[in-house]
Amino acid sequence: MSAVSRVNGASGTGTGRAVVFDFGGVVFRWRPLELLQEVLPQRVPDEEAARELAASIFQSFDVGSDWAAFDRGTIAEDDLVARISARTRLPAQEVHRVVDAIPTHLEAQAPTVELMRRLKAAGYRLFYLSNMPLPYAEHLERSHAFFAWFEGGIFSSRVQLIKPEPAIFAEAARRFGIVPADSVFIDDHPGNVEIARAEGWQSVQFTDVVQCEADLRSAGWVPAD
């Protein structure tokens, strides 16, 4: 399968077509191993220890996980901390430190922001579709002027749906007023990309901005240099 699926005669100009961005790992930094090494260095003396602790805390963000419930907006931060602490036997104070450190960890990635700016200038409609707990969503909205570039967006905690559930993609298309086949969704998580494609979206799996832009260009979304 091509890097961008279901391309339908893209012309190289925006013409009102939509580009939908995931946030964590695409627009904003998300490096959980680095986060844990910074916040709980006594627990993670090396990368392997950080990897094991990340797997234990975040559970790969699986749909049935504690963190997925936080992303969905069905549990509050204190409930999340209590669940993780009980499950991992980490002191609640340490879990709180991890949870509280995430908003500032989510730094905007300048190359992706620049790509968004150029896509906006080229006439594309920009939207976002992000699994994000409400406290983090509100922090990001307060902190970044480029939210004005988006015509709209969905944070999972505000609709109580999460990726990769097909329902959140249907809700996004409905709210944004877009046709999935004429829109491209960008996400770093392969499972989300797979479901988006199954739901009829064009989709790019993001590794870095150079690769992402190359895939968009090859599909006609970005004009050739």
Image (cartoon, rainbow, N blue to C red):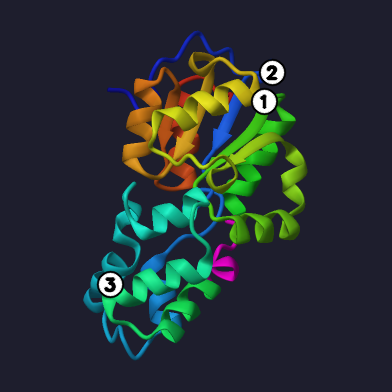
Q: Is residue 60 above or below residue 128?
A: below
Q: Is residue 155 left or right of residue 2?
A: right
Q: Residue furthest bottom?
A: 42
Residue 107 lies in the magenta stretch: yes
Query: Regarding mark 2 in the picture, which secondary structure is present there?
Result: loop
Where residue 96 appears, as percent x and y from the top left, is: 48, 78
Mark 3 vs mark 1: give the one in front: 3
Residue found at x 54% / y 13%: 10
Query: Regarding mark 1 in the picture, which secondary structure is present there?
Result: loop
Instruction: Find the distance from the CA under tag 3 to the CA under tag 2.
Output: 47 Å
162 or 49: which is nearer to us?
Answer: 162
**Which circle marks residue 209 in the picture?**
none
Q: Quadrant of the C terminus?
A: top right
Q: Earlier in the sequence, mark 3 or mark 1?
A: 3
Instruction: Find the distance from the CA under tag 3 to the CA under tag 1.
Output: 45 Å
Mark 3 vs mark 2: give the one in front: 3
User: Of the residues shown, which amino acid type is indicated by label 2?
Assistant: Gly
Q: Residues within 10 Å of mark 1 (few under 14, many from 20)?
A: many
Residue 27 lies in the magenta stretch: no
Residue found at x 50% / y 8%: 9
Residue wearing tag 2: 16
**Which circle marks residue 87 in the picture?**
3
Q: Residues within 10 Å of mark 3 (few under 14, many from 20)?
A: few
Residue wearing tag 1: 124
User: Of the residues shown, which amino acid type is indicated by label 1?
Assistant: Tyr
Q: Is residue 208 above or below residue 118?
A: below
Where residue 127 appears, as percent x and y from the top left, is: 63, 34
Instruction: Find the magenta span and give its range.
Output: 102-109
Q: Please say whether residue 142 is visible from this viewpoint.
A: yes
Q: Please say whether residue 216 is visible from this viewpoint.
A: no
State the image quarter where residue 85 is shown. Answer: bottom left
